[in-house]
Image (cartoon, grey):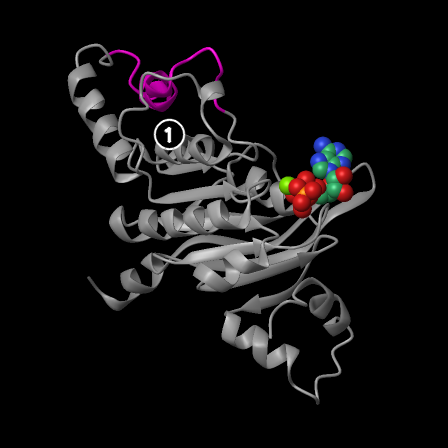
Amino acid sequence: MNQNNDLNNSFVLEFNKVSLKIEDKEILKDISFKVKRGSNTFIMGPSGSGKTTILKISAGLIFPTSGNIKILNKDISNINDLYEIRKKIGFVFQYSALIDYLTVLDNILLPLKIRNKYDFKKNYKTYLEKVLEILEKLDLKGVEKYYPNSLSGGMQKRVAFARAIISNPEIVFYDEPTSGLDPIISNSIDKLILSINKNFNITNIIVSHDVNSALNISDYIIFIYKGEILFKGTIHDLKNILHNPNNYDTHLPIIKDFFYSIT
Ligand SMILES: Nc1ncnc2c1ncn2[C@@H]1O[C@H](COP(=O)(O)OP(=O)(O)OP(=O)(O)O)[C@@H](O)[C@H]1O
Ligand SMILES: [Mg+2]
């Protein structure tokens, strides 16, 4: 591979000067960032700052007013490319979003059923084996026959993870994967996200306001506030900023307020 290809390959998601206006309200303001392949990248910020909007734009569910977005080196404004890109990304939605009247098995099979409409039946045995293998890796062995309602919140989250990775994506987006879970379960979810990154070679993009999770597993953090990026960097960079007595950045109080628990 030549050097150029290497460079092109090192980022899986790029936002370049992206803005979004809905009825005169500026939801995102001139946002630029890059997500490194193989990283666990956190998009953080208080409620209403625009985090979920960034995910929706990345999925091509809404289009920005200006700017451009590349996923796996393809511009998502090209509809043909968007279709191909969608095959390579997985989503874990806020509140898991499992379908109550389908068993765990059928919930996880759903993306394969939708994508492989015509040969689903023919490949069923292979798909089933794959689901069982993933369930085992995610410590969910034996739950395939249950309905989501009979599982705990943490287990439902893990089923949602299984569904997101069943079609071998290169990137998985998570919207608030630890919200509503106690600290112990949250820690186990963090570990699982990390194992998805390592064992399945997946770049994780995690929307969160859980500072603890970021401390545990982030390689890179993008902090967004009222639609603007106020910080991009590693935990190490963040600590330097927070503890530098000569930092007079006007945004510092907002960043400090959000990351107050980092010492
Ligand atoms: N379709 C829409 N029409 C108008 N305003 C919207 C729309 N979608 C989002 N917004 C506004 O955009 C802003 C960002 O919303 P978004 O859902 O991205 O925030 P968030 O950071 O994910 O918040 P939370 O942490 O509460 O999930 C909010 O002020 C929201 O009210
Ligand atoms: Mg949100």
> Which residue, given by chain and number where applicable, does mark 1 sit on?
163
Neighbours of disc 1 within 10 Å: few (<14), some (14-19), many (20+):
many
In the picture as drawn, the residue positioned furthest to the bottom comes out as 246
Q: Which residues are magenta?
A: 98-118
| Rendered location of residue 223, percent (x, y) | 62, 60
In which quadrant is the N terminus drawn?
bottom left
> Residue 254 sits in which quadrant?
bottom right
Of the pair 126 and 263, the residue shown nearer to us: 263
| Rendered location of residue 253, percent (x, y) | 76, 71
Residue 212 versus residue 64 in the image, above or below: below
Asked if the stretch drawn in magenta spans residue 116, the answer is yes
Of the pair 29 and 224, the residue shown nearer to us: 224
| Rendered location of residue 210, percent (x, y) | 58, 54
> Residue 88 sits in which quadrant?
top left
Residue 211 versus residue 121 in the image, above or below: below
At x 35% / y 59%, what residue is drawn? 8
At x 71% / y 47%, what residue is drawn? 47
Badge 1 residue CB within 8 Å of ligand 2:
no
| Rendered location of residue 159, percent (x, y) | 39, 30
Asked if the stretch drawn in magenta spans residue 111, the answer is yes
At x 31% / y 32%, what residue is drawn? 140
In which quadrant is the C terminus drawn?
bottom right
Q: From the viewer's perspective, is 165 left or right of 226?
A: left
Q: Secondary structure at mark 1?
A: helix
Of the pair 36 and 260, the residue shown nearer to us: 260
Figure disc tally:
1
Q: From the viewer's perspective, is 38 left or right of 53?
A: left
Amino acid identity at mark 1: Arg
Quadrant containing ligand 2: top right
- Residue 9 seen from this side: yes
At x 22% / y 22%, what residue is drawn? 127
Residue 98 versus residue 171 in the image, above or below: above
